[in-house]
Amino acid sequence: MELSVTEIVKIIKSETNIIKREKAIAFFFLNLSRELMSLALERVDQELSESMRNRGYQIEKKNQRSINMAFGEATYVRRRYVKAGQESRYPLDKFMGFDKYKHYSVL
């Protein structure tokens, strides 16, 4: 968190125009929220991994996905699982309510 405060202080000190300063700070927070969301999604995906393995699924591959959310685009890596006789699935996408071919969240 200290790193974020330091970066905001740098923005505040580097911009003399108050409108540009506020825009730069807003942009910083949007980027920060997207990065945090990406990390959180990857952590939830990792936590779902154990329950999927307990149900007999195996990780087929990991791939990247981007989804537009209320605060901007979040890009994350999620696991695709397979099991004999079952369709492959992305449990994180199901958990979050992300539709298969849409690149935006419900909100």
Image (tube, helix red, strand yellow):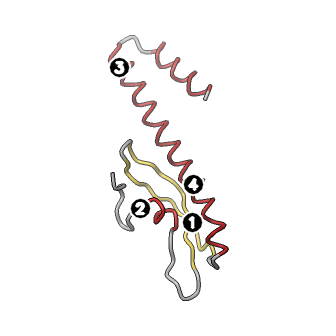
Judge depth for marks 4 and 3 and give the one in front: 4
Task: Using the numbered discs, state the Cα–Cα distance from disc 1 to disc 3 in whole angstroms.
Answer: 40 Å
Residue 102 shows which numbered tag?
A: none
In the picture of the structure, the residue carrying the numbered disc 4 is: 42
Q: What is the spatial separation of the Cα atoms under label 1 and label 4, in whole angstroms?
A: 9 Å
Comparing labels 2 and 3, the label whose residue is closer to the camera: 2
Which quadrant of the structure image shows residue 58?
bottom right
Residue plotted at (63% across, 65% down): 49
Residue carrying label 3: 20
Q: Earlier in the sequence, mark 1 or mark 3?
A: 3
Look at the picture and state if 44 lies above or below 81.
above
Element marked by disc 1: strand
Q: Position of residue 43 (x, y in %)?
A: 60, 53
Q: Label 1, on which residue?
A: 79
Mark 1 crowd level (few <14, some 14–19, many ≥20, 10 Å Cα) = many
Furthest residue toward bottom: 85
Residue 47 in percent (x, y) is at 63, 59
Badge 4 vs badge 3, beta-carbon distance below 8 Å: no
Q: Earlier in the sequence, mark 1 or mark 2?
A: 1
Residue type beneath disc 4: Glu
What's the distance in space between the residues labelled 2 and 4, CA to CA?
A: 15 Å
Residue situated in front as seen by the camera: 19 or 51: 51
Residue type, mark 1 in image: Arg
Contact flag, marks 1 and 4 (Cβ < 8 Å): no
**Foreground: disc 2 or disc 4:** 2
The residue to which callout 2 is attached is 97
Tell me if label 1 and label 2 are in contact, CB under 8 Å. no
Would you say the residues marked 2 and 3 are in contact, meaning their CB atoms lie under 8 Å apart?
no
Position of residue 56 measured from the top left corner of the image (x, y, whole percent): 64, 79
